[in-house]
Image: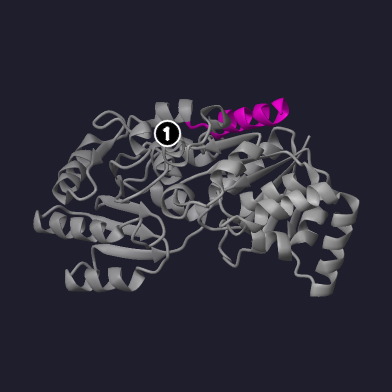
Amino acid sequence: MKVLYSVTVFPGISETFILNEILEVQNQGVEVVVFARSKGVDKIFNEQIKDVKEIYYSKKESVLKLLKYHLQLLIRNPVRYLNTCKITMHSKSGIKKLFLYNISDVIRVKKIQPDIIHAHFGGIASNFAMLCKLLFNTNYTFTTHRWDIFDHPPGNYLIKTKLSKKHITISNYNRNYLIEHFQLPKEKIEIIHCGIDFTRKEFSLTKQAGPIPQILNVGRLSDQKNQKALVEICKKLKEARVKFLCKIIGEGENRKLLEDMISLYDLTDDVILLGPQTQNTVFDELSKTDVFVLTSISEGIPVCLMEAMAMKVPVVSSNVNGIPELIDDEKDGFLCDVDNLDCFVQKIIKALEAGLNVGYDKVYERYNLKKEVNKLIKLWRSV
């Protein structure tokens, strides 16, 4: 069985879950080919990229060559070509541009001869998979996560879902939202979680205790991840004379804002912006962490929370979207309304006192990468 992964950027430092999934699919005996719109520029990306056996990237072609390809497809199968024109020309999702200017990429995928295409996210990558279906009847599935549902949903979800073999999403919350807001057929939507690779040695290591309790946050420095709330929380913790060192891993448009807040609140010795880091460094920091805090205003089911729980680190998180499916408050971790900073302060203190997290068993049973990939492969084999 050969599966072609359609992705927008590869490798992408904020999308290590895609790389982990691809590697596990390979481990389970499936041939994988990656086809990406562009190459990631992050130099610190996980070194495991070398283990992906086949990677292709989109190629730009001259107008004359594009016209030649379009004419060839029209002559070979005029009904299919004109039907593709009809669907793409009236779409507001960006697939029209793909059809006009990336037709050579579709032909390249046809030559690779995948049994099925799998795309991540509801935007360009799944548009490309849909285009391959329209022109060459190649089966596809695609997985939606967060921004492609709540922030920037495409205008063609209904037809894209109907043409797919399955529209996969990562939480019950997402599934219900997709059905309600986009009128998607229930039977076409499957829930398969992102998962944790429990074969990693880090999940069996003993925690490294430090002299000062450490708080960790991992995520893009953005309004959605809401680290400005975390800085406010740290200000309140300091005012309450709680000893701590907060580390924030990630990069983004809010770096200057966070730097200014840290300076204004006199937290330069208490809150450190570590910038983007490798996955190995993230695990190293988790091994020294006493409580993992997530203050996001919107999420799917974050892999960073799963990783913290898998390393038996207590977690305190905002109670948004699919997160309550991962964390039962006061049982697997601690939840707060996103704008209730006092709640975060109280539960961080409680988490520091609680010691080891008891969420490991849930993550192992329900968010195990090997099990979730096995579900994905079974789905592909059934279509």
Of 11 and 64, the residue lying toward us: 64
SS at circle 1: helix
Instruction: Name the colouring of the figure.
Output: one colour
Image quadrant of residue 329?
top left
Give the residues in magenta: 367-383
- Residue 269 or 252: which is nearer the viewer? 252
> Does the magenta-highlighted stretch encompass residue 379?
yes
| Residue 328 position within the rendered picture, expressed as x and y whole percent measured from the top left | 30, 30
Question: Does residue 185 appear to the left or right of 134 in the view shown?
Answer: left
Which quadrant does the N terminus fall into? top right
Q: Nearer the viewer, residue 166 or 35?
A: 166
Q: Which residue bears the numbered disc 1? A: 176
Measuring 23% from the left and 35% from the top, which residue is drawn there?
A: 354
Q: Is residue 48 visible?
A: no
Is 348 covered by the magenta stretch? no
**What is the number of callouts on the image?**
1
**x and y percentages locating residue 167 in the rendered image:** 58, 37
Q: Nearer the viewer, residue 61 or 193?
A: 61
Most extreme residue toward the left is 240
Residue that appears at 79% across and 70% down: 61
Q: Residue at x 57, y 31 (%)?
A: 188
Label 1 amino acid? Asn
Q: Position of residue 166 (x, y in %)?
A: 61, 34
Residue 262 in sight in this render:
yes
Q: Main secondary structure of the magenta part?
A: helix
The percent position of residue 148, horizontal first and vertical second, equals: 49, 50
**Hey, which quadrant is residue 8 in on the image?**
bottom right
Left or right of 166? Residue 198 is: left
